[in-house]
Amino acid sequence: MILVFELTWDGSTHGPGNSHLIQMIAHAFPEHAVRVHAGAGHLHELRSFPALTALANLSFEAVSLWGDAASRSKTQDVSLSRFCFEFNILRAALAAAPKGERLLLVFASATSTAILAARLALRVTGREAGIQVGLHGNLNDLQAQRSRNPFLRALDMRAVMSRPRRGLRYLTFEAAIAAELRGMIPATANAVDSIPLAVNVSELDAWRPLELGEPLRVGLVGLATEAKGITQFLETARLFRAEYGPRIEFCLVGSIQGRDDPERFRDLAHPVAQGHMPRAAYIERLLSLHYVFLPLKPVYYRLSPSGGFIDALTWLKPVIATRLPIIADCFDEGGDIGHLCDDLAGMQAVLRAIMARPEPARYARQVEALRRVRAGREPAALAPAYRRLVVEGFPGFSGEANDTIAVP
């Protein structure tokens, strides 16, 4: 049996990503039951994905979550009360799992205390299980300021990851991130696996073709953060609107942070809003784009996959992006899927070239190249690779399954 836990995020946050992760797991191990433990709001979001709920080996278990959303999001903070809360949830889940079955615990996201709580819960319940820890943006906790308290410092993510443990492995969602992690914490060298971040297949019926033309629509996708390059995007919008007028439009497909000044977004094609952007509006604006603009900052994205890039891949929008490893690897895989640039000046030069000499035929080829890459990142397509890494990394869990389904 595979027990999946989302103890950090509730509601719609990380809903699509967790849906794809769980689909991949369930497709990879159809002979195992997969039970998902999460807050009631998050389970409600997950049940909105028909491709997920159609899986016969899947069930859901609502659990209480520690603290409020703001407290839970501070994954770098070590909290003993959080540890106790996580321990009780994990112990109850283990106690409810059928006796005699091999177990795998998968954290869709995790704090350092959740990892420690899982190990203690296994010891207390007398169960044996592998522990797989999914690492998303919170891997950047490794760069956060650490507590001066030696006890709390010994329990933070850097300390936990620096102590290799049998049966504990980490899962990153791009190979370049796994390589970066091994360089930062050599102790993880033999305990880190990687699988590409999956695309969202549940809404693809809404996709529609778009020919290259004017006004050229360029968008930044997701929350307007500095790590994502929002300032560089707004600078580009100001320059190009002054130079080309209505021939080009810049769109934010997402929302702004609470402390941001809406006035600095005045050169965008649509008014911006704080808070959650309704999904239907998000998709409609994304579908209107010709290009997704990704001036990503390595300070964050060397350790995190880009949701904006995955949305571009899902909705077949060629990218104009900085040359970060997570993006460059996909260009190596897919070929001409947009324009890879060394810096913002290069990205702006690409836009000027497109405005001066548009190439509709090349644009159409880029869309088809994205389609081929997308097909390989569907949850079912990733399942054999995921199964293989589990079989190799957790032989105690998967030994019985090796002969059940061939692993390429």
Image: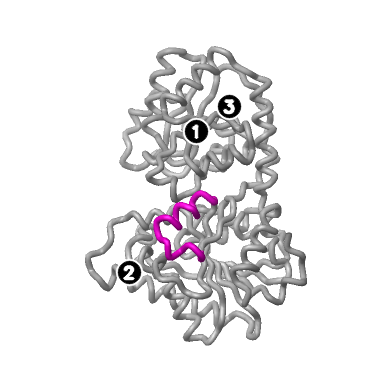
Magenta stretch contains residue 25: no
- The N terminus lies in quadrant: bottom right
Look at the numbered disc 3 and give the secondary structure of its residue. loop
Judged from the image, the secondary structure of the residue bearing numbered disc 1 is strand
- Amino acid type assigned to the residue bearing label 3 in the image: His
Instruction: From the image, tell me which residue sits under label 3.
Output: 290
> What residue appears at the point 67 percent right and 36 percent down from the top-left corner?
207
Q: Is the Cβ of the residue at disc 3 closer than 8 Å to that at disc 2? A: no
Instruction: Kindly identify the amino acid type of the residue bearing the numbered disc 2.
Output: Ser
Q: Residue furthest left?
A: 148
Q: Which of the two marks, 1 or 2, is nearer to us in this view?
A: 1
Q: Is residue 387 left or right of residue 353?
A: right
| 237 relative position to 15: left or right | left
Residue, disc 1: 321
Q: Which mark is residue 79?
A: 2
Three-letter amino acid code of the residue under disc 1? Ala
Crowding at label 2, few (<14), some or many (≥20) Cα neighbours within 10 Å? some
